[in-house]
Image (tube, rainbow, N blue to C red):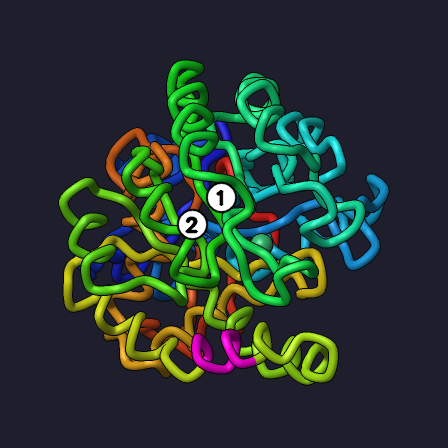
Amino acid sequence: MSALRFSGPVLPDGEVREVYVVDGRITYERPAGLAGAESAGEGWIVPGLVDAHNHLGLEDGGAVDEAEIERTAIADRDNGVLLTRDCGSPADTRWVHEREDLPRLIRCGRHIARTRRYLRNYGVEVEPDGLLDTVTEQALDGDGWVKLVGDWISREEGDLTPSFPADAVTAAIEAAHAQGAKVTAHCFGEASISPLLDAGIDCIEHGTGLTAAHLEQMVARGVALVPTVLQTSKFPEFVSAARDKFPTYSATMESLYAGRREVLMNAYDAGVALYVGSDGGGSARHGVLHEEILAMAAMGLPNEYVLGAASWRGRSWLGWNPGLDEGDPADFVVYPRNPVEDLSVLAEPSRVVLRGKVVA
Ligand SMILES: [Zn+2]
């Protein structure tokens, strides 16, 4: 029997413990024959991080090949991310499930967008009358989540516009739920959100247009928010590229950018469940979840709240063991300092343990 020993304060409660890993699982009972065995790592032990909004298999131009998917999944993993919720990828990444050395993955399938109203080569593009069938297909194809593009610029209207009418969205979300899949949606603006919440959506991505009434509804219904602060910090870039051609859109994005911190803090104060997403893939890099954690904390959220969102609470939300209890899968990260006191240590994990193996 091979066993590994780690020691240090185990978050979230911070109790100092000897943690043993046997057959991929945690045990606090010292396995026979391990007395005096060398420690495999000492430090602050944190349940594996969760990237709640990531795009494995996607870059600027669309899908990438398996070598690139492997490279980026390892970049995320070595950053401490051991569970990823993929929020839409044009590449078929289901093979990642078979790879013991790559993070656990929950796939959304492909983005579902309105025709010619999203980034080219990213999603499945449909008109409202095709939405229900497409959502059903993607619900059957994914790992229990479906991703809608809730709003995007309409070139005809020259502004950020809901992708689909309310009745189409309502039927689509009902169809996804009937397949046992949850639904999340990319929403920058305000107008797309009410129909989604009324239809029972499970999560909102970005959410810069959320009003106080929306937040109240989200709390009442347990709808999560993944704010992707690194991504929304790029709104000024989107605006400068579009200002001449689409002045109304630019003004909308400027106003959302100006209000984004207030919206985030209002969501926190209202009690909306927030999770942490790097939005890695597309135009963003992989392996930077720690930067998103730091960016959320810099907006004013407490360190412990953000770390919990990126670890034990995020894991629980996605159906995994939140902490490191006896018998749990051994997915954890060891840091040389207490990340609750100093989040910057998240950039330098000393050990990454996935499925009971030291992978970094
Ligand atoms: Zn995204």
Q: What is the distance, in whole Å, between disc 2 and disc 1 at their CAs?
A: 7 Å
Ligand 1 shows up in the quarter that is: bottom right
Chief SS of the magenta region: helix
Name the residue rendered at 31%, 66% in the picture: 306
Residue type beneath disc 2: Gly
Residue 36 seen in this snapshot: yes
Is 140 displayed left or right of 303 in the figure?
right
| First in residue order: circle 2 vs circle 1 | 2
Residue 247 is a magenta residue: no
- Label 2 belongs to which residue? 48
Range covered by the magenta-colored residues: 251-257
Could you say which is closer to the camera, residue 32 or residue 117?
117
Q: Provide the secondary structure element on which disc 1 rests.
A: strand
- Label 1 belongs to which residue? 83
Residue 255 is a magenta residue: yes
Name the residue rendered at 47%, 39% in the picture: 165
Q: Provide the secondary structure element on which disc 2 rests.
A: loop
Residue 352 seen in this snapshot: no
Residue type beneath disc 1: Leu
Proximity of marks 2 and 1: CB atoms separated by less than 8 Å: yes
Could you say which is closer to the camera, residue 139 or residue 66?
139
